[in-house]
Amino acid sequence: MLQAFPKVAAYVAAFSTTTTSETAVAKALAGEIAIRGKLPVTIPPFAKYGDGIERAARATAPDSGSNVPK
């Protein structure tokens, strides 16, 4: 799959297709939750074992029009 997109600057690997993992990836890409992890495998020639990233969740202002109880 990585070879099909050689110009992409970054990839997200969840290593699971469960709903929980897919939801976490979507939230991480939207900045709602932090991204952190290390690759548990080597993917030649793209990444080495242990490559990874850590990014904090994006800070957001409270939504004054939210229907969610506080």
Image: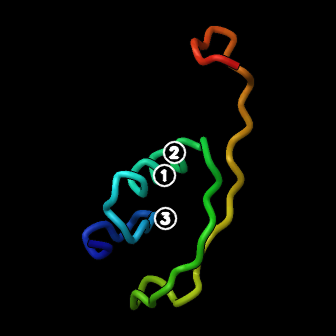
Give the SS element for disc 2: helix
Q: Residue at x 42, y 57 (%)?
A: 21
**Number of residues whose C-alpha sits closer than 10 Å to that of mark 2, classed few (under 14), some (14–19) or many (20 or more):** some
The residue to which callout 3 is attached is 10
Front position among marks 2 and 3: 2
User: Amino acid type of disc 3?
Assistant: Ala
Q: Say which label, 3 or 1, has the lower sequence index.
A: 3
Separation of residues labelled 2 and 3 (CA atoms):
16 Å
- Residue 32's place in the image compared with 68, above or below, is below
- Quadrant of res 68: top right
- Residue 55's place in the image compared with 27, above or below, is below
Percent from the top left, x then y, of residue 14?
Answer: 43, 66
Q: How many marks?
A: 3
Separation of residues labelled 3 and 1 (CA atoms):
17 Å
Foreground pick, 36 / 20: 20
Foreground pick, 14 / 49: 14
Q: Say which label, 2 or 3, has the lower sequence index.
A: 3
Separation of residues labelled 1 and 2 (CA atoms):
5 Å
Q: Residue at x 43, y 83 (%)?
A: 46
Disc assigned to residue 40:
none
The residue to which callout 2 is attached is 27
- Residue 43's place in the image compared with 3, above or below, is below
Classify residue 30 as left or right of residue 69: left
**Quadrant housing the N terminus:** bottom left
For the residues labelled 1 and 2, say whether their Cβ atoms are less than 8 Å apart: yes
Q: Residue at x 46, y 53 (%)?
A: 25
The residue to which callout 1 is attached is 24
Figure coloring: rainbow
Percent from the top left, x then y, of residue 36?
Answer: 63, 65
